[in-house]
Image (tube, rainbow, N blue to C red):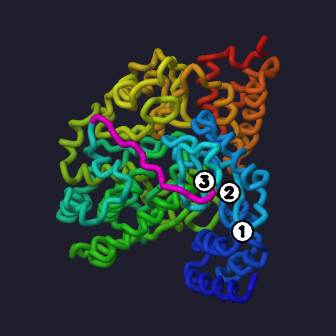
Amino acid sequence: MSDPDLIRLRSTLAALAPQGRAALLPALQAAQQFHGWLPEVVAAEVGRALAVPLADVHGVIDFYAMLSRRPMGRTVARVCSAPVCALAGAEGLADALCRHLQVEPGEVSLDGEFTVEHAPCLGLCDHAPALLVGETALGRARPEQAAEICARGARPVSFVGGDIRILTSNCGQGHPTSLADYRSGGGYAGLNKALTMTPQDVLAEVKAAGLVGRGGAAFPTGVKWEGAAKAPGHPKYIVCNADESEPGTFKDRILMEEDPHRTIEGMIIAAHAVGARRGYFYVRGEYPYAFKVVGDALEEARQAGVIGGNLLGSGLDFDIEMRLGAGAYICGEETALLESIEGKRGFPRIKPPFPTTHGLFGKPTVINNVETFCNVPLILERGAAEYRKMGTDRSPGPKLFCVSGQIQKPGLYEVTFGATLRHVLFDLAGGLKQGRKLQAVLLGGAAGAFASEKDLDVILSFEHLGAAGLPLGSGAVMVFDDSADLRDVLKRIGQFFADESCGKCYPCQLGARRQYEILDRAAAGLPVAGDRERLADVGGTMIDASLCGLGQTAATAVLSALKLWPEMFERKK
C-alpha cells in the first residue's frame, strides 16, 4: 500500500474510531475501496484503529461475501444465479463476460479492472437476467452485450401496478421522490398527526389496525412496539431491516429507490411510540443505489428539521444512521442483522431474550422491514378503522407482491389482501407467455413452497394461504411454465441455502449441504434409491432443530415439491 493511500485510509479510520467495533463493517467497506480487496496490512490497520483483534477482523471479512482477502478486480461484475435469472440465461451471460474479459470466474482481468462472480439473488428478479457491475444494476442483459455491460449502462426501471396504488403511489417513475414532492402528495401527514397524540395512543392505533410484519414472520407490529415501549432500559432503538435477500423479492428495493421518505416517516412514528432517540437503516450490500437514495433522503429530511433534534418543533429528538450490508442472506434474520450492526459476524442469537427487551447493543429495540414501516403513516393518517376496511378481517391493509419468472409482465403489484393468485398472475401480470402452460408457482421465495394450477383461486391472505398449506412469506411470486426444468430450480434453491447457511448450528449447516447434494444428483438425472426418504428426513430435521428461520425454512420448497411431484426424484428411464 502506497503512503498516500495509507494516509487516506488512516484519516477515514480516525473518523470511525470513536464508534469502536460497531464501525467495523463500514470501516472494512471503506478500506476495500482502495484496492477492491483487503490485504493483511489493511485489515491490521482497521483492527488497530477500532481496537478490534485481528482474528475478529478476519472473521468478519470471511463471513461476508462482498468482502475479500484475496485479490479482486477494482470492479466486480456479479451475475445473478438465482432460479429466475438462470431460466432467463444467466449462465450464458456469465460465460460471455468471462470470454470477453479473458478470465475465469473469480479471477482478475489483466488490467486489474474486472472480476466476474456468480451471485445469489440480487433483488432484480423482474429484470432477469440481472447483474451488478460495481454499483450499477443492469437487467435483461444478453451475452452479446458483454462489452457494453463492462462499460456500464442505464439502471433498469421496474414496472409497478396493481388494483390500488397506496404504498406505491410514488413508485414506477424510475426516480426517487423528493421531500417537497412527498409532502405535496400528503407525505408526513401521518407523522404530524402522530406527534399530536401520546405514545400510548399511537401504539393503540397501530395495534387496532392489525398490521403484522411484511417481511415474512407476520408478527403483530403493535405488540412488538408495545413490548419495546414497556421494556426497562435506555437508550431504545428503531431498526429498519432493508436486507431484502429472499430470492424473488424486490419490493423493498423499489420502495427505497423511489419513495424513501415513506419508510423514514414510519420509523419516526415508531420512535415517538416507543421512546427511541436513535435509529439504524440497514440496507443489503447488493442495493448500493437504494443505500444512496435513502442516505440522500435522510440528509434532505435532516436539513428540513424532519429528523434530528426537536424534529418539526415537537420536542422529539430522533436521528437515523445508515448501514450497508456486505452480502449475507442470514442478516435478514433480525438478530443476525443486529449482530452485523454491532460489528460482528451475522450469527443469529438464541431467543429468548427477544430484541424488544435485549436488542441492539443489548437495549430494547424495534426492528421492522421497509414495507411494514411504509404501512405506518397510512394507519396514522387514515385511522385504524379505515385501514381495516381494506383486506380481510385477519389480514387487513394493502400488500405488495413481487411477480417474476416466466410471466408476461414481471413487476411489483399492489393489491388488498383478498385478491386471488389467478387475479394477480393473469389479470394484472398478463398471464403466461403465448403457447405455454403453468407448471408451478413458488410462493414466498426460496424459503417458500410450490403451488400448482389447482391453487390459482386461493385467496392471498394469511388465513387462506395457511389453510391451503402455502406461505405468504415475503410476497415473492415466482412463475414457472411447462418449459422450466424444476429439478434445476430445486438444485439452485438447495445450493443457495447450502452457501448461505451461517454455520452456527449443525442441523442447518450439515442439512443444507446434504439437501443440495441430493438435489444436484436429481438435476443430473442420477438420483439413487432412497433419495426421497433422505430429503424428507433431512428437511424435517432442519425444520425441527435449526436455530433460526433460515434452517427452519430451507427445506420448505423442496418438501412441497416432494409432495407434488414425487417422480421428480426417481431415476429417468
Disc 1 secondary structure class: loop
Frontmost of labels 3 and 2 is 3
Stretch of the chain drawn in magenta: 149-163
Q: Position of residue 84 (x, y in %)?
A: 57, 36
Q: Position of residue 425 (x, y in %)?
A: 41, 27
Cα distance, mark 2 to mark 1?
12 Å
- Residue pointed to by mark 1: 37
- Main SS class of the magenta portion in the image: loop
Frontmost of labels 3 and 1 is 3
Q: Residue at x 74, y 67 (%)?
A: 112
- Nearest the viewer among 444 and 232 is 444
Magenta span contains residue 572: no
Q: Position of residue 124 (x, y in %)?
A: 52, 46
Mark on residue 65? 2
Disc 3 secondary structure class: helix
Q: Earlier in the sequence, mark 3 or mark 1?
A: 1
- Residue pointed to by mark 3: 149
Q: Up-down: is 238 above or below 446?
A: below
Q: Residue at x 77, y 14 (%)?
A: 572
Q: Amino acid at mark 3?
A: Ile
Q: Up-down: is 485 above or below 304?
A: above
Q: Quadrant of the C terminus?
A: top right
- How would you rate the neighbour count of disc 3 (Cα within 10 Å): few for under 14, some for 14-19, many for 20 or more? many
- Nearest the viewer among 438 and 352 is 438
- The answer to the question of whether label 3 and label 2 lie on touching residues, with beta carbons closer than 8 A, is no
Q: Residue at x 60, y 78 (%)?
A: 20
- How would you rate the neighbour count of disc 1 (Cα within 10 Å): few for under 14, some for 14-19, many for 20 or more? many
Q: Amino acid at mark 2?
A: Ala
